[in-house]
Image (tube, rainbow, N blue to C red):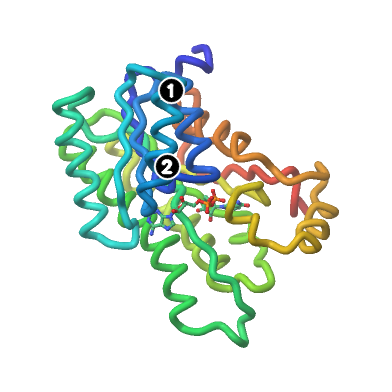
Amino acid sequence: MAASSRLISRLTLVTGGGSGIGRAVCQRFASEGASVVVADRNEESANQTLELLSRDHKGQGHLALGVDVSSKDSVEKLVTSIQFMCLSCFLAAPPSVCVNAAGITQDEFLLKMEEDEFDKVIEVNLKGTFLVTQAVSKALVSAGAVKGSIITVGSIVGKVGNIGQVNYSASKAGVEGLTRTAAKELSKFGIRCNCVLPGFITTPMTDKVPEKVIDKLTAVIPMGRMGEPAEVADACAFLASDDSRYITGISIEVAGGLFIG
Ligand SMILES: NC(=O)c1ccc[n+]([C@@H]2O[C@H](COP(=O)([O-])OP(=O)(O)OC[C@H]3O[C@@H](n4cnc5c(N)ncnc54)[C@H](O)[C@@H]3O)[C@@H](O)[C@H]2O)c1
C-alpha cells in the first residue's frame, strides 16, 4: 500500500503529542489518513498540535485531550473519553494504534541524585508506558478488536547508559523489557507491541543539553548529525501500519548509527 494511505480510518492515540517526537508522529499519522488523538499533560501544546492537524489534514476527526500518563485515573479517563467522544464524532472503537511518546528527563549524577528525581522519571517514562499500554490493550480486547499496534518510545541510552541519566536510562531499559513482554502476552489478541529507540533527536528535550555536550555527541554519531523528530515518526508509521504486520516485540534504533559497536 502507498505510504500516504496506510493509516486511513485508523484511530490513533499519541501521548506526548504536544511536542517534539510526539507532535511529529501526530503529523505523520494524519498525513497517512489516520484520525489522531493528541494527548499531553500540557493541554495548550496538545491544542497547538491539533491546530496543525486541523489545518493540514481536515475532515479526519482529530482531538486533543489532557492526560497525565503517570496517573492511572487520568489514563483511564483518557481512554474512556476517547471511546465516548469518538462514538459521537468519528470512529466507535478504542484506538487501534497507540504511541507512548510522553517522557521527561531529570538529569543528575548518580552520587547526587535525590530519590524523588529517580522516582519521577520512572513514574512518567516507565509506569506511564505501562498504564497507557494496559488501558489501550484492555479496551481493544473488550471491544473484540482484531488488530492493534502499540508503539513504545525507549532510547538508545537504555541500552548503553549515559552519564547523568541513571533514572532515565533505567526507565528506558524498562520500556524495552515491558514492550517485549507485552508483545508475548498480547499477540494472541492481534495486538503487536514494538519499541523505537531514538538516538539524539532535535526537540525541546535536547534543547536543554549544553551546546558543547551536543557537539561532543554529534562527533560520535556515524551519520554526523542529530536526528529529526520526523525521522522517528517514519519508523512509528511503519510499525503502526500493516507493512509491519508480522513484526512484534522488536526495537528499531533511529540513531544515525550511534553505538552500533
Ligand atoms: N529527543 C531525544 O533525543 C530523545 C531520544 C530518545 C528518546 N526520546 C524519547 O522520546 C519521547 C519524546 O521526547 P521529545 O524529545 O519529543 O521530548 P519533548 O519534551 O519535546 O516532548 C515530551 C512531551 O511529553 C509530555 N509529557 C511529559 N510528561 C507527561 C505526562 N506525565 N503525561 C503526559 N504527557 C507528558 C510533555 O508535555 C511533552 O509535550 C520521550 O519519551 C523521550 O524520552 C527522546
**Residue 94 sits in quarter:** top left
- Work out whether residue 132 can be spotted: yes
Q: Residue at x 48, y 76 (%)?
A: 118
User: Which secondary structure lies at badge 1?
Assistant: helix
**Residue 119 sits in quarter:** bottom left
Q: Residue at x 60, y 86 (%)?
A: 112
Number of residues whose C-alpha sits closer than 10 Å to that of mark 1, classed few (under 14), some (14–19) or many (20 or more): few
Q: Amino acid at mark 1?
A: Arg
Q: Earlier in the sequence, mark 2 or mark 1?
A: 1
Give the x, y percent position of residue 131.
31, 56
Q: In the rendered image, which residue does mark 1 sit on?
A: 55
Give the x, y percent position of residue 251.
55, 46
The CA span between labels 2 and 1 is 22 Å
- In the image, farthest residue toward the right: 219
- In the image, farthest residue toward the top: 2
Relative to 24, say whether 29 is above or below.
above
Ligand 1 closer than 8 Å to the CB at disc 1? no
Relative to 146, say whether 225 is above or below.
below
User: Which secondary structure lies at badge 2?
Assistant: strand
